[in-house]
Amino acid sequence: MLNHNPRDILAAGPDAIAAAFGVPNSTPHPLADELNTAPLSRMAYAAGLAIRPQQPHENDRTVMARGMQSSDFAAMLAAAGTTLANRRFSAVAEHRAFCAEIECRDFKPTAICTTDIDSEMAEVGEQGEITQGRVIVGNGTEAQLRTFARYLRASRALIVNDDVGMLADAAAQLGTAGARTEAREVYAVLEANPTLDDGELVFHADHGNIVASAFDATSLGAAMAALRTMTLMGGNQADLPAAHLVVAADLELAARKLIHESGLQITVTATGRLTTGRWYLLPAPEVAPTVGVLKLRGASNPILVEPWQDEFAYDGAVMRARCDTGAVLVARTLIRGGV
């Protein structure tokens, strides 16, 4: 079944499976092309031979079955699956456009706060004196990274039949699931209107960040003005430009039409996870972060697919997809709209 050393085949495996999954690679392993007609079954067979040579009483499928249980085979599938899952995550996670990433050192509660200065820059005096300012820390809260996971099982029949398309689609769906899970956390914290460490709600009339009106041009204008004129912790005027409009599903058409006809440089994100009639107006996260999504320090991607040993012997290969995430409101410099 193989014309090369099993270890050479396994070395080409990641590139061969990635190519079969539709993941481009400008410098593939020289043997990768030879495996593209049957990448799963040939990888499983090579992994089985790497464990021990084929015995006289063993047929090819017996060797494949042994290889499917190996860490080498599962690791190759997991690597390609991670790429596909994160590609899909990026396509589905529309909420990320208005969120800032917040790195957590571990899974313990993490203190998060907003900083401001107590004044704008002052002119340097004739003698070169510079007015000192203070950094103000406030709007504190705690957030905790949580782990969400699902299993992905590739059956022996799927591997023997080289049903690459089905496996690739399943891996991509893990990215969809991860993005939807994170979106659920983001919209839940927006709707919850939590209390910050000063004992006050994020959204309150006293903070000037509520427009209690149905969405239309007038209420949007009021929200844009509020972002400009609200007062920050240090007493400065925010003067923030509106960059993101997040609306409930029933407002999507009206929101997109109004933004387009007005020629505003505002990105519209619609979701079915908000209360009917609800809308939010936010500044750009790189200008003034308001909604944060959590990530584990050192993590390069939201989704990690990894080999997994099932509690019970499974006739195939088992992987686990993990998404470490969470959501938190980190400032009051956003506007909530709706009746």
Image (cartoon, rainbow, N blue to C red):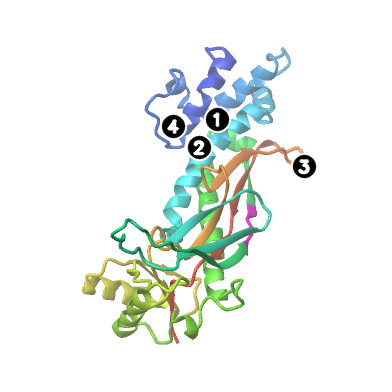
Look at the image and say whether residue 145 sits in the magenta stretch.
yes
Foreground pick, 213 / 160: 213
Q: Nearer the viewer, mark 4 or mark 2?
A: 4
**Left/right of residue 256 with respect to residue 100 in the rendered view:** left
**Residue 58 sits in which quadrant?**
top right
**Left/right of residue 215 with respect to residue 263 in the rendered view:** right
Give amino acid for label 4: Ala
Quickly name the residue at label 3.
311
Which mark is drawn over residue 19? 4
Q: CA distance from mark 3 to mark 1?
A: 23 Å
Give amino acid for label 2: Val
Q: Quick one: SS at disc 4?
A: helix
Q: Quick one: SS at disc 2?
A: helix
**Left/right of residue 288 with respect to residue 79 in the rendered view:** left
Labels 3 & 1 near each other (Cβ < 8 A): no
Q: Quick one: SS at disc 1?
A: helix
Which mark is drawn over residue 14? none
Quickly name the residue at label 1.
40
Labels 2 & 3 near each other (Cβ < 8 A): no
**Residue 209 sits in which quadrant?**
bottom left
Look at the image and say whether residue 19 sits in the magenta stretch.
no
Part of the protein shown in magenta: 143-148
Give the x, y percent position of residue 47.
Answer: 63, 23
Quadrant into which the C terminus falls:
bottom left
Q: CA distance from mark 4 to mark 2?
A: 10 Å
Q: CA distance from mark 4 to mark 1?
A: 12 Å
**Left/right of residue 73 with respect to residue 289 in the rendered view:** right
For mark 1, does the 10 Å Cα neighbourhood hold few (<14), some (14 to 19), or many (20 or more) residues? Answer: many
What secondary structure is the stretch in magenta mostly built from?
Answer: strand
